[in-house]
Image: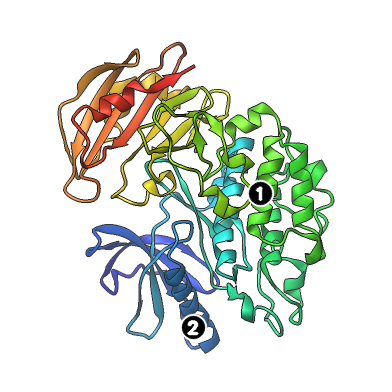
Amino acid sequence: MITPARIGAYRVERLLGTGSFATVWLAYDPALADRVAVKVLAENWSHDLRVRERFLDEARLLRKLDHHRLVRVHAVGELPDGRPYAVLAWADGGSLRDRLARGPLPVGRALTVLDEIAAGVAVLHRHRVVHRDLTPSNVLFHSAPGGDRVLIADLGLAKALASASGLTARAGTPGYMAPEQDDPLAVVDTRADVFGLGRLGLRLLGRDRAPGGAADGRAAGSRLRAGVPAAVDTVLRTATAVRPADRYPDADAFRQALRRAVTGGPAAVRAGWAPHPGRLVAGVAVALAVAGTCAADAVHPAPAGAVGRSGPLTVVLPVGWRAEGTGWAGRYGDDGDLEPALVISPDPGNWAADPTLPGAFVGLATGEARRAGPAAFLAGRAHADCAAAPPRRSRQGGVEWTVVTYTCPTGRPMIVEAAGPATGRAGLLYVQLVPPPDAGADFADRVLAGVRTG
């Protein structure tokens, strides 16, 4: 395949992937000064009006929904030969399929990813859209200051619920598609996506490399890995029931059932489990007891003296800020568990995506990263487009912090990077902070003074 020099105004860098209906290229957008993914309809389908319209429908739907849990669309265009293309946000962390090809995720991380996938699908369901093709290839990761963000992609087969029944063409990926998707006369609704979530759960948590097995997942219990709470087996069995009526009604109900199953599991699994957007206020994991998506966003800002906690890591919250126990995505300790981490902000769920929000990512590295030392660790996290002040030392909360402050021409005007040896244990504390615009010069030190381990 010949790599085009340009697609519209976008300079092509390399091929990201090919599929049955489209090719995706990594390109540079001079207007955004950033890399993007450009999805182009395959040449052999360019004259099929049905496929062409489905391609454009996906772009329009993603643009309309415009949610941080879904791949975002920047623009659409048309090549000189008439083929349409869509310009998408680039998911630089690759796909779930890529990650699973390298080996199974730790159980805690796998449960977190499944929770995140369900949260993304729940966005579709709240807008009365059914995805119909949930597979590891359609789950992407985008790196952000607070850790990887899970994105739902490829809505080419998605349909509005009002038109998702009756004479619907067979659609989906074998092994993940619900049985009713094989019947052109069947009603296909949100419960088809619940089946797909159950299959993804088997892929993430099973001993086998693919879900396989009986169509209703009855053999799931014998194939789940050691350390997976027994109640999760029941959740996956319900999700993959043959009859839609026997499944959870939608992705949010599946997600709440999964959370209840995990909170009753082994402590080691709960420690690696990092639900998002789980609010941890005054050290109490309130989100795990929340029933319903709307209620999960109703936790009030923290009062003075409130503390966020993730495993042994605690942070005293600035007044009006909340804490979200994310875990340190992609970083594991010597014991194989996800490293503890928190995002703190007035709105932690949107901090990574919204440059106008103040906030901080706070992590505790107990594995390989701690052996680099604070200065070396910070040197690997420089911000290329920003000007760095000379490193300074600040002793706060019993920790000898190395602090580097960056001023930036675009996006967040100031970013503070800090690292120091954890007190009372072998580990490295790391903080990336964006202060409020009206904060005093000592704001960063006050945040650092509230970071504790124990």
Q: Where is residue 366 in the image (x, y as percent from the top left)?
A: 47, 22
Nearer the N terminus, badge 2 or badge 1? 2
Say whether residue 329 is visible: no
Q: Which of 416 and 2 is in front in this view?
A: 416
Residue at x-position 59% and y-position 36%: 273
Indicate the quadrant where residue 130 lies.
Answer: bottom right
Q: Are marks 2 and 1 in contact (CB under 8 Å)?
A: no
Residue 287 lies in quadrant? top right
Residue 223 x, y percent position in the rendering: 78, 43
Disc 2 from disc 1: Cα separation:
37 Å
Residue 364 location, quadrant: top left
Image point 74% across, 81% down: which residue?
A: 184
Badge 2 marks a residue whose secondary structure is helix
Q: Residues within 10 Å of mark 1 (few under 14, many from 20)?
A: many
Taking depth in this image into account, of 309 and 130 the one nearest to the observer is 309
Q: Quickly name the residue at label 2.
A: 52
Q: Position of residue 162 (x, y in %)?
A: 63, 79
Residue at left offset 34%, top offset 12%: 398
Amino acid type, callout 1:
Gln
- Say above or below: 83 vs 321: below
Within-10-Å neighbours for mark 2: few <14, some 14–19, many 20+: some
- Which quarter of the image is occupied by the N terminus? bottom left
Instruction: Work out whether residue 239 can be spotted.
Output: yes
Q: Where is residue 25 in the image (x, y as percent from the top left)?
A: 39, 64
Specify whether 188 is left or right of 347. right
Left/right placement of residue 330 relative to residue 122 reads left
Question: Is residue 373 shown left or right of residue 118?
Answer: left
Q: What residue is shown with label 1?
A: 256
Amino acid under disc 2: Arg
Residue at the far front in the pictured view: 303
Against 130, residue 56 (above or below) is below
**Position of 204 compared to 279: left or right?**
right
